[in-house]
Amino acid sequence: MAAVQKLQKCAVSSAGKHTASVIFLHGSGDTGRGLRAWVRDVTEPDLTFNHIRIIYPTAPARPYTPMRGALSTVWFDRHKISRDCPEDRESIDDMCNSLGLIIQGEVNAGIPKHRIVIGGFSMGGAMALHLACRYHSDIAGVFALSSFLNKDSAAYQAVEEHHQAQLPLPELFQCHGTKDDLVLHQWGEDTSVLLKEAGMATTFHSFPGLHHQLSTPEMELLRGWILKRIPPITSS
């Protein structure tokens, strides 16, 4: 196992008192700052909250097999972009440990895990699912946009084991474009079905005509879901 890495990140602070956090993971080849800029461009008004801090980490550059070993900012390695191949479990688990430091940092700042949501776009969504299903199932929720898990993913078994043991599981929110030709819509839908069968509460939203990208209607749905999972704390 590789040493736990401290990841670079940018953050959008809450406008008021910080009582909840979202960790939003970018897709392959992007950065936290790049995702932050994309979210700002497609979301009207901007994805900001009075009580929620949003953290955009950046994956470290590593050799990426689908790019013939070229360096890319990816959360883990893949044999190929397909549901029909084994996961690179070692690189996934190493990154779960590194991202766990960010979660722990929020806990140290006074944010309980049931007030933390983790999610991502494309590979970032898959990474978020591994974090939420296998390592941090007591968070408030997980979201995956244009994402998928491999058919034999360790996440499915983890969800099933948690469900059978009556342990907490986060709610899953997914969005996927029907015209996505990089991560097929069917892959995302199959991921939702398998996680639901394993015992997870899931919602899956299809966006007709949307390619492998974020969209304004999608981000509005995400905003509403985040507020349901981690609403403002009202004074008694």
Image (cartoon, rainbow, N blue to C red):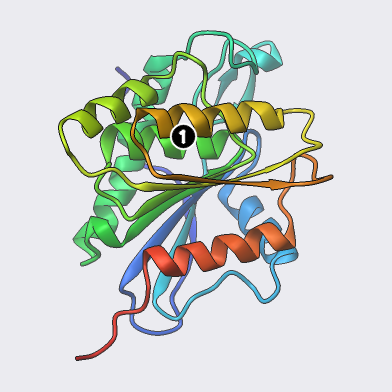
Does residue 75 appear in this view?
no
Tell me: 165 left or right of 206: left
* Farthest right residue in view: 209
Between 44 and 194, which is closer to the camera in this rendering? 194
Question: Can residue 222 be seen?
Answer: yes
Q: Residue at x 40, y 85 (%)?
A: 16
Residue type, label 1:
Met
Above/below status of 23 relative to 70: below
Assess disc 1: are there few (<14), some (14-19) or many (≥20) residues with their C-alpha within 10 Å of its C-alpha: many
- Which residue is farthest bottom? 236
Identified at 62% across, 13% down, the residue is 65
Question: Where does residue 118 sit, x and y in percent of width and height?
Answer: 42, 50
**For this view, does 191 lie left or right of residue 19?**
right
Residue at figure coordinates x 79%, y 29% from the top left: 181
Q: Which quarter shows the N terminus?
A: top left
* Number of numbered discs on residues: 1
Image location (x, y in percent) of residue 161: 23, 25
99, 205: nearer the viewer: 205
Residue occupied by mark 1: 127
Q: Position of residue 188 (x, y in %)?
A: 61, 32
- Numbered disc 1: secondary structure: helix
Q: Is residue 134 above or below residue 175?
A: above
